[in-house]
Amino acid sequence: MNRTMSSRVSAERRTPERRIGVHRGADPGPLVLCIAALHGNEPAGMIALERVFAELSRIGLPMRGDLVGLCGNLQALGVGTRFVDEDLNRVWQRERVDAVLESLSPDGSSGDGDRVPMVGSAELAEQRDLLAAIREESRRARGAIHVLDLHTTSSESAPFSTVGDTLQNRELALRLPVPLVLGLEEQIDGAMLQYFDRLGWRSIGIEGGQHAAESSVEAHEDVVWIMLEALGLIEAASSSARKDRRVRLARQAEGLPRVVDVRHRHVVSEADGFRMHPGFRNFDPVQAGDEVGTDRAGPVRAAFAGRLFLPLYQRQGDDGFFIVRRLAPAWLAVSRLLRVSGADRVAPWLPGVQPHPARSDAVVVARWARNRGVIGLLHLMGFTARGESGGAVMVRRQEGPARQPESASRDG
């Protein structure tokens, strides 16, 4: 049973600010940009970052590069809900981000200046201010930019990571001794990590555990310290306490697959009256036909065998649950070989595949070809699904070079 956050810990989020903390090293190096509380009912990442910044200040640890912590949704955090008007982790589509960036002052701030103020949801205001902070920090960066998006889950869960499946993101995530989940970005439109992928920045999502569990705060602390060491911002741990962080994370993920792939998403709405049956933990095994919940139409069953992923135990949200399956190491090795060798150039020659009429980085797959292994081969080559229009549009993932936010959406 997870320990819940103490009243002292909960009190740490009384007056949140956009910048959780900044620690700039004396020497240039990578920028590690941590974003926490993109959902207002997930304060663990913010609390973990406050502790990391406090410890860095206390011990005076030399650093090469910069660590910056940003709070995502201040308004939702203030009332303890996932969001106020709309999910802030579903609004990072190209067109919307372009409009928000266009509304910012020339100096990159969210002050309107001569621009016409944007009017909309609470989350639009949050996104605008957050983008201004991200752009400011990217302009100050003295090295490669790495993003950690810190989240928690409504169900009990071991820590795990999610990425847009680029080779550079994969390499970053596999530095952590926790399961890596691939394919989630294809199931969810407008996630923030998709924006960073368009920029060509290395970025990973970290789910630390259940929302109110003290272990979730500790997991996020461990992840940040491990990444600071792995990316060379600080020297490798010399104390046993810091060495134990990797062991502690690995222990929580014991017995779980190293890499899994999302195979199914059960979408829900308020009108469905969906209720997940109590007691499921993230990554619990399920068999095809197992009853996992109910809605207005009756029992809801698992579509096929696998592991239950992100079962919904909160009021807000449109993801009832997912089903994931283990990915064999050979799949990762083959996909890396194909991507490094430039195999994506032959994608338009595959059966049922044509070049996209308007995008050089995309192809269109006819409906008749989607059940013949073509989609799977395109995934191996580094393409990801991006909607339908008489067929599946597959876009090649951005591996770099890294770009500034001003140009992030122009051709990605």
Image (spheres, rainbow, N blue to C red):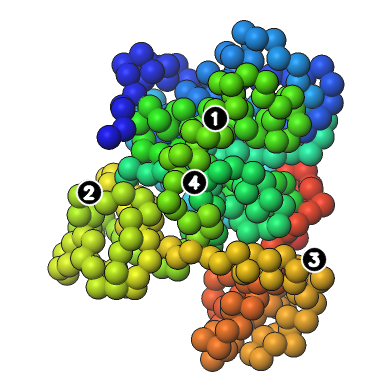
* Residue 18 found in image quarter: top right
Q: Sequence-wise, which precedes: disc 2 or disc 4?
A: 4
Q: Sequence-wise, which precedes: disc 2 or disc 1?
A: 1
Name the element at disc 2. loop
Q: CA distance from mark 3 to mark 4?
A: 26 Å
Asked if disc 1 and disc 4 are in contact, CB closer than 8 Å, the reply is no
Q: Residue furthest front?
A: 240
Q: Percent position (x, y) of residue 75?
A: 43, 29
Task: Rate crowding at label 3 as few (under 14), some (14 to 19) or many (20 or more) other CA atoms within 10 Å.
Answer: few
Q: CA distance from mark 2 to mark 1?
A: 28 Å
Asked if disc 3 and disc 2 are in contact, CB closer than 8 Å, the reply is no
277 shown above or below 12: below
Q: Which residue is mark 4?
A: 160
Q: CA distance from mark 3 to mark 2?
A: 43 Å
Task: Rate crowding at label 2 as few (under 14), some (14 to 19) or many (20 or more) other CA atoms within 10 Å.
Answer: few
Name the element at disc 1. helix
Asked if disc 3 and disc 4 are in contact, CB closer than 8 Å, the reply is no
Name the residue located 70 percent from the left edge and 87 percent from the top edge: 350
Viewport quadrant of the C terminus:
bottom right
Residue 352 located left or right of residue 270: right
Frontmost residue, 97 versus 294: 294
Q: Which mark is residue 245?
A: 1
The mark closer to the camera, 2 or 1, is 1
299 shown above or below 152: below
Q: Percent position (x, y) of residue 208?
A: 46, 38
Q: Which residue is mark 2?
A: 279
Q: Which residue is mark 3?
A: 340
Name the element at disc 3. helix
Q: Amino acid at mark 4?
A: Phe
